[in-house]
Structure formats: C-alpha cells, structure tokens
Image (cartoon, grey):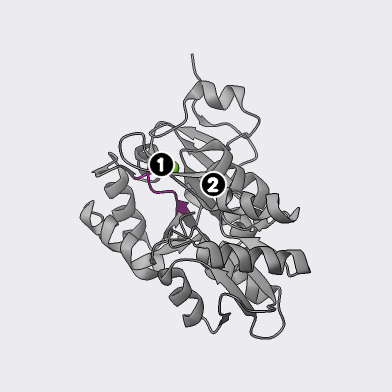
Amino acid sequence: MYKMGKMNAKAPDLKSIGCFVLDMDGTVNLGQTPIKGAKELLDLLHGRGISYYFFTNNSSKSPMGYVEKLERLGFENVTLDSIMTSGDVMVHYLKTHCEEAPKVYLAGTPELEAQFRQTGIVLEPAGCSTADFAVLGFDTTFDFEKADTLCRLAAQGVPFVATNIDRVCPLEGDRFWPDCGSMAAMVTHATGVEPVFVGKPSAETVNYILDKTGMDRSRVAMVGDRLYTDIKTAVNGGITGIAVLSGEISYEDIEQGDVAPDYILDSVYDIYTALK
Ligand SMILES: [Mg+2]
C-alpha cells in the first residue's frame, strides 16, 4: 500500500502555505485539457487571498502567451503578474549580481529581449567586444553570430549564465526541440566554460520567488510533476515540495529517486480538498 499525503513530518501544514508556485503541464493541465481540481483550487486560493503563481522554465515565450493559454484552459483570475519564467529569474540574478544597470549580451528570442529591456537592462549587440554577462535563453532564433559572440565572451572570462538546464523542449507527438541546456553545452564544448543555470531546479529560482512575493520560505510551496526540476527546486531552495502524480512521475519513480518531496499527492485536487 502506498503512503500518500504528507511524507515529511516537519513540513508545514498545507493550510499554512501562503503562496503556491505551480508547474503547468502535468500539474494543472495535460496538453489542452485542464486537470481535475485545478480550477477549483485556483478559485479557492483566489477567494481566500492566498497567492498563486505559475512557473515555467521556458524562456522563449512572453508571459502574456501563458496568460492566454491558461485562460483557454478555463482558468480565471490569471494575470501577467501570475506568470513566472526562468527569464524573470535571470533578470533578478543579473540585477542582484551587478551594482549598476548590467550590460548584457543576450542570445534569446525577441520576446526575451523585450522582457530584459523593460527592466532597464542594457543589451549589447551580437558581435560586441565585451559585456558584464553573456546570457543564453531558450533561443529559437539562435544563429552562428550569436554562438560566436557567446563563445568569444565566455572564453574572455565574461560570466556565462543560462536561463534553464533543460536539454529538450517536448512538443506534441513525441517530437522535441533542442532546449537551452543543449545550446549551452555547445558553448561549453567550445570553450570549457560551464554556465550558471538559474531556472528550475536552481536555488536562484527560489531566491527570485521569495524576493518577488516577500513571503517567508516556510510559507511557500512548489507544486509539480517532475522530481528533478519541480521538487528539486523546493529541496535546493528550502521551500515545501509537493509532488503530484498527474503528470510525468509515478510513485515508483519517487521511491527510486533521491529527491524527497514533502508531500506526494494524486493531483492538485488533493490540495483543494485539504484546504476546503
Ligand atoms: Mg510539468
């Protein structure tokens, strides 16, 4: 018989959580279908004034695209402010690691470039001779000049940072795209320089969440269906990790893995019933 529910006796009670950070695919939706209980949970959180955010490691799209996607799934009360991306974590990282407005070379999509500029970050053009940081996003507009610029800056000793560690971005029907982790591996192969990755599962993601929400670590939970991204983020950042079995991982995967969630639940419906 599987043991479900609270796995770590020291973990905070679900009722004391003041901020839920939710993964999307596998957690609140499966493709175009909302997961049972997700809408009820969001309505309940909204009604009680408990914060909730959606976090994605995908830095290629603008947050507005996710608002529209969540609205299409039937979720109400989702605003631009509800969306967190690894691009936001990167902006936070750059601003907290540089005293003045950072000058950045960014290999990213036009959406990510716009997101950076809106926060006052100065972007240097491809071919630039120096920068405070060489930044790589999940860049679906990547080209040779960008690769050359990143490699040259990294080889010169400019700090090389990347938005997310993912090797592939899964698409419909078993297809995939090479993701930021694979693009970063090319730069590392050429230069020997390893990047700092800031999205899930890095503790930088939690630093960003805590700064944005102003919430104490003990009151923030990360909810997700992947052990080595969602739950590992919680472990690395010292927040509550809630694994849901509605997506990628099974109970056996958790038993065999070396990342321990604080809670194991069938789906977000169980959070809803615990809070109701
Ligand atoms: Mg997921």
Rendered image quadrant of residue 133: bottom right
* Towards the viewer: 166 or 139: 139
Q: Main secondary structure of the magenta part?
A: loop
Question: Of the numbered discs in the image, which one, if any, rests on residue 176?
Answer: 1
At x 70%, y 69%, the residue is: 153
At x 46%, y 69%, the residue is: 112
The quadrant where ligand 1 appears is top left
Q: Quadrant of the C terminus?
A: top left
Camera-side mark, 2 or 1: 1
Q: CA distance from mark 2 to mark 1?
A: 11 Å
Disc 1 residue type (three-letter):
Phe
Query: What residue is shown with label 2?
Result: 166
How far from the left and from the top, in percent, is residue 196?
68, 57
* Towards the viewer: 68 or 16: 68
Report whether 191 appears left or right of 117: right
How far from the left and from the top, in percent, is residue 51?
43, 61
163 lies above or below 123: above
In the structure shown, which secondary structural element does the residue marked by tag 1 occupy? strand
Looking at the rendering, the stretch of residues picked out in magenta corresponds to 21-28
124 lies above or below 207: below
* Towards the viewer: 269 or 105: 105
Considering every residue shown, the one lying at the far top of the view is 1
